[in-house]
Amino acid sequence: MDRVKVNGKFFKKHIGEEQISCKVKKLAEEIDRDMKGRNPLVICVMTGAMFFAADLLREVSIECEITSVKLKSYEGTESSGRVKIDDTLKRSDIEGRQLLIVEDIVDTGLSMSSLLEEISKLSPSDIKVATLLSKPEARVYDVNIDYLAFEIPNYFVVGYGLDFDGYGRGLKDIYILDNNQL
Ligand code: 5GP
């Protein structure tokens, strides 16, 4: 499908599933090469990264442990847009470990930079970041991305895990908001 309606808005295809699958395999090869023997703990950032992580980690052949984290916003007076991690990640799981964070998209970089700050407090030996998408034009907070599938322009996207108010995650391709909504 080249054009889809998600939650009342039209989106057009931007990256097809074959392209995604090819890139995912390449990233998996890089991860295999870089992390061999390091027994990484892979942290999938829910919910957006679930399909990317599922495909990537089935291509990776080194041994790794897999977990997930959900981000939550600060509440009340601390609400500055920064995020906190839920309490599934314990210091005892993270301390001294090689981590690989798998994210759906780095936009302004706020979520990833605060996630990195929070996780660093749990003393991992090293943290690498894999993201499906990055919008460099939107970046406000500097984030070092180690494994990037695609750079995209500063438009809203859905599909392959990314949602529009909860809809569209299950699309096999990645779609970008269509300027033409007719
Ligand atoms: P950031 O903190 O980097 O500005 O934004 C990161 C989060 O915002 C992502 O994890 C994602 O949940 C959401 N986000 C940013 N851009 C998009 C987009 O184009 N489409 C969707 N569906 N979510 C986005």
Image (cartoon, rainbow, N blue to C red):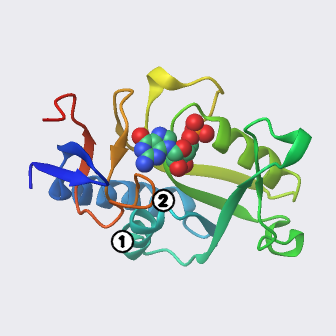
The kind of residue on which mark 1 rests is: Glu
Q: Position of residue 162 (x, y in %)?
A: 40, 55
Give the answer, above or below, for where 135 lies relative to 23.
above
**Alpha carbons under labels 1 and 2: distance apart:** 19 Å
Query: Does the CB distance between marks 1 and 2 fall below 8 Å?
Result: no
Front-most of 75 and 13? 75
- Residue 131 in the image: x percent, y percent? 48, 49
- Sequence-first tag of 1 and 2: 2
Relative to 60, residue 140 above or below: above
Tell me the SS state at disc 2: loop
Label 1 sits on residue = 59
- The residue at label 2 has a CB less than 8 Å from ligand 1: yes
Q: Which residue is drawn at 73% across and 53% down?
A: 126
Callout 2: 10 Å neighbours few (<14), some, many (20+)?
many
Label 1, secondary structure: give it: helix
The image quadrant where one finds the C terminus is top left
Front residue of 99 and 115: 115
The answer to whether residue 38 is visible is: no
Q: In this view, does 65 lie above or below 53?
A: below
Looking at the image, the residue that sits furthest to the left is 1
Which one is in front, 22 or 171?
A: 171
